């Protein structure tokens, strides 16, 4: 393998790794707030003796915060792309 071929191979691998890290980061940004809010809702339901009231409320809050995180992340990524181009 020549030096140029090896260099192209390394560039391709770095792009793949960046894509994988982005996808895993997005997954964690969605899963963590939803999971933590669900746990908090279950805990509060057990403490106050309600059935699923807090679980529903905090699950909805978790989903909303997850989408907010994605929105903010998308804005930052868009700004990074604009800075690179211009």
Image: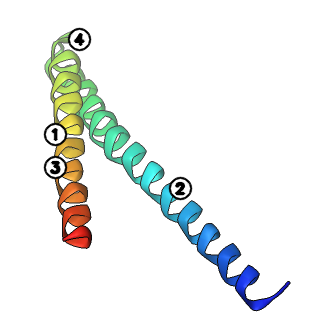
Measured in 3D between alpha carbons, the distance from the residue under mark 2 to the one under mark 3, in whole angstroms, is 19 Å
**For mark 4, what is the residue?**
52
Q: In which quarter of the image is residue 12?
A: bottom right
Residue 39 in the image: x percent, y percent? 30, 33
* Mark closest to the chain's N terminus, 2 or 3: 2
Q: Which label's residue is closer to the chain start, 1 or 4?
A: 4
Q: Which of marks 2 and 4 is nearer the N terminus?
A: 2
Q: Return the residue nearer the eye: 84 or 61.
A: 84
Q: In this view, does 46 lie to the left or right of 7?
A: left
User: Callout 4: helix, strand or loop?
Assistant: loop
Q: Tell me the quadrant of the picture where the C terminus can be found.
A: bottom left
Q: Residue 69: x percent and y percent?
A: 20, 45
Element type at mark 3: helix
Residue shown at 21%/16% (left/top)? 56
Q: Residue 20, labelled with which disc?
A: 2
Residue at the disc numbered 1: 68
Residue depth check, mark 2 versus mark 4: number of the one nearer the observer:
2
The residue labelled by disc 3 is 72
Left or right: 65 as drawn, with respect to 30 = left
Residues at circles 2 and 4 in contact by the CB criterion of under 8 Å: no
* Residue 28 horizontal side relative to residue 36, left or right: right
């Amino acid at each position: 393998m020549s030096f140029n071929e090896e260099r192209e191979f390394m560039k391709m691998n770095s792009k793949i790794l960046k894509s994988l890290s982005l996808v895993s980061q997005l997954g964690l940004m969605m899963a963590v707030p939803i999971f933590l809010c669900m746990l908090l809702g279950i805990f509060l339901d057990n403490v106050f003796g309600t059935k699923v009231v807090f679980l529903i409320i905090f699950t909805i809050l978790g989903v909303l915060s997850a989408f907010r995180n994605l929105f903010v992340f998308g804005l930052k990524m868009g700004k990074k792309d604009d800075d690179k181009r211009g």
